[in-house]
Amino acid sequence: MAFSPLVDELVEALRCLPGVGQKTAQRMAFHLLERGRSGGTRLAEALSQAMTGVRRCQSCQNFADSDLCSICQDPNRRNGLLCVVESPSDLLAIEQAGDYKGGYFVLMGHLSPIDGVGPEEIGIERLLKRVREEGVSELILATNPTVEGEATAHYIADRLDGENVLITRLAHGIPVGGELGYVDGFTLTHAFRGRKPLSE
């Protein structure tokens, strides 16, 4: 049975969200129409404002309401330290940990030639220009430990070869509280390769 064109359009619009299929989109639409009209109106307004008002920070490419995001405007962030991440959610995870106080550069993806994503699409030239102009002393490559993330990290490191910049990579390995018997082989291999003296 078909619903009205407005209901059908709402369901189809909700399906653009990741992990939302037909049934989930229908449940969301029915909830908003049956019991959540005020929430639906607020959601529509917030979406409209975000879609028109949120842009990329001119320095780090993170989401921002103005030319520079709040992190790039913060004078207390450590100069010379720059962390490269794939997405704003990666940046948020690092910020929530609370220990890192340097700057960021958000790639908004990773290199994936098969999908047509090259260095230009993720802003690598902008990153290299920033590293050189700001005199970055350490570049932390915090791309994800996937094939694409590793390839992206190696590409950036190769492009900065010969520059006076310390290039580091986040450690990969066994999570705190983890047990060896439950760790996959890839993670275990990385843990062995990244081992360090106990006294450090």
Image (cartoon, rainbow, N blue to C red):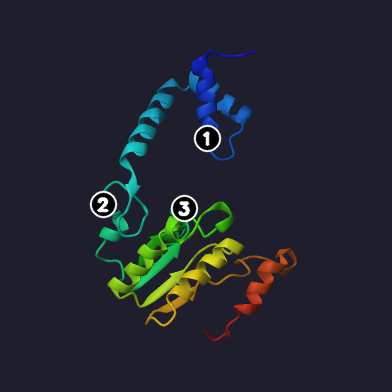
Q: Which residue: 40% across, 59% down?
A: 123
In the rendered image, residue 111, in percent from the top left (x then y), is placed at 52, 60
The vertical placement of 88 against 37, above or below, is: below
Asked which secondary structure carries label 1, the reply is: loop
Q: Which residue: 65% across, 78% down?
A: 192
Q: Nearer the viewer, residue 195 or 127?
A: 127
Report how far apart the C-alphas of labels 2 and 3 lie in the structure: 20 Å
Q: Mark 1 — residue?
A: 16
The vertical placement of 174 against 19, above or below, is: below
User: How busy is the neighbourhood of tag 2: few (under 14 within 10 Å), some, or many (20 plus)?
Assistant: some
Tell me which amino acid carries mark 2: Asp
Q: Which residue: 72% across, 68% down?
A: 185
User: Label for residue 67?
Assistant: 2
The residue mark sitting in front, 2 or 3, is 2
> Is there any visible trace of residue 107 in the rendered image?
no
Q: Which residue: 40% across, 23% down?
A: 38
Q: Mark 3 — residue?
A: 89
In the rendered image, residue 104, in percent from the top left (x then y), is placed at 38, 63
> Is there any visible trace of residue 193 in the rendered image?
yes
Tell me which amino acid carries mark 1: Cys
Tell me which amino acid carries mark 3: Ser
